[in-house]
Image (cartoon, helix red, strand yellow):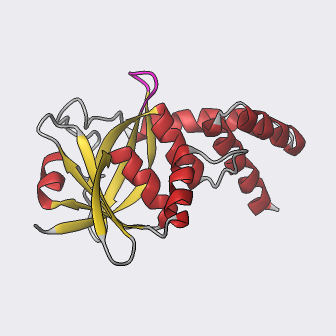
Amino acid sequence: MEKHKLELVGITYNQIESGVYAVILREVGGERRIPIIIGYPEAQAIECKLQDVVTPRPLTHDMIVNLMTAFGMSLREVNIHRLPNGVFAADLLFSNGTDTRIVDARSSDGIALAIRTGAPIYTSEEVLNEAGFLPEETRPKPRSSHSTDRPLDKKLSRNKAEGNELSRLSESQLNEEMQKAAENEDYEKAAKIKAELERRQKEI
C-alpha cells in the first residue's frame, strides 16, 4: 500500500457545533488536505504543544512520552486510516530497538504523540481520495459527519476578534492571565496568550 506523508497545518473551530474542532493535515509535496473532527480535550493537547505552553504537571500525552522514554521505547510512525463507519483512526508503530508493536489509537492521540516525538504521520491514497480536499475550494465537500469543517476564513475572523481582546491587555496582565489559565488547566487560552506575548516580542 502506497503511503503518503502528512504534515500538521493547524486546528480550526467548528462554530456550528460547540466544543468541536478539526485538525487539518496536508500531504507533503502535494495540495490535498484532510480535516479530522476532534473534541476540545484533544484539540487542547495538540494546541498546547504547538504553542509550547508549559503546564504545571505533565498532560496525558506528555506522560505517555515520559513512559516511552523510561522504558526505552520510541514511536516510529503514525498511520491514519478510516474505519468502515467513516471515523478516522490511527495505527501507532512502537519500537524498543529490537521488537516493534502496532497499537490501535484515536487519530487525535496519534497526532498529539507524533508532534511530541517527531514521528512521521502517514496515510493512504485511498484516504486522500475519499476525505481530502484542495485549499482553493471555498468549502470542503462533506464526506461524512466525521470529515466536515466550517470554512477557514470564519476561523480566522474568530481568532482576529480574540486577538483584538488580548491586544488591549498590558504585558503584565497577559502574564497574569496566562498563569491563571494554566492553573485552571485552560491550556487553549494559555496558548493564545503566549502567542500574543511572542507577537509583541517580535515587534520590539
Rendering quarter of residue 70: bottom right
Rendering quarter of residue 82: top left
Give residue 165's position: percent from left, percent from top: 71, 32
* Residue 24 colored in magenta in the image: no
**Is 23 situated left or right of 87 in this image?**
right
Rendering quarter of residue 151: top left
Instruction: Name above or below for residue 22 compared with residue 16.
Output: below
**Is 83 situated left or right of 134 in this image?**
left
State which region is magenta.
Answer: 15-20
Give residue 195's position: percent from left, percent from top: 67, 50
Residue 136 visible within the image:
no
The secondary structure making up most of the magenta span is loop
Tell me the quarter of the image containing the C terminus.
Answer: bottom right
Number of numbered discs on residues: 0
**Is 158 situated left or right of 128 in this image?**
right
Give residue 97's position: percent from left, percent from top: 38, 77
Residue 14 visible within the image:
yes
Q: Residue at x 89, y 42 (%)?
A: 172
Instruction: Name above or below for residue 53 compared with residue 177.
Output: below
Tell me the quarter of the image containing the N terminus.
Answer: bottom left
Q: Residue at x 71, y 43 (%)?
A: 193
Give residue 200's position: percent from left, percent from top: 77, 54
* Residue 16 colored in magenta in the image: yes
**Is 64 situated left or right of 91 in this image?**
right
Q: Residue furthest right?
A: 172
Between 83 and 17, the one lying in front of the other is 83
Between 137 and 184, the one lying in front of the other is 184
Instruction: Name above or below for residue 146 compared with residue 53.
Output: above
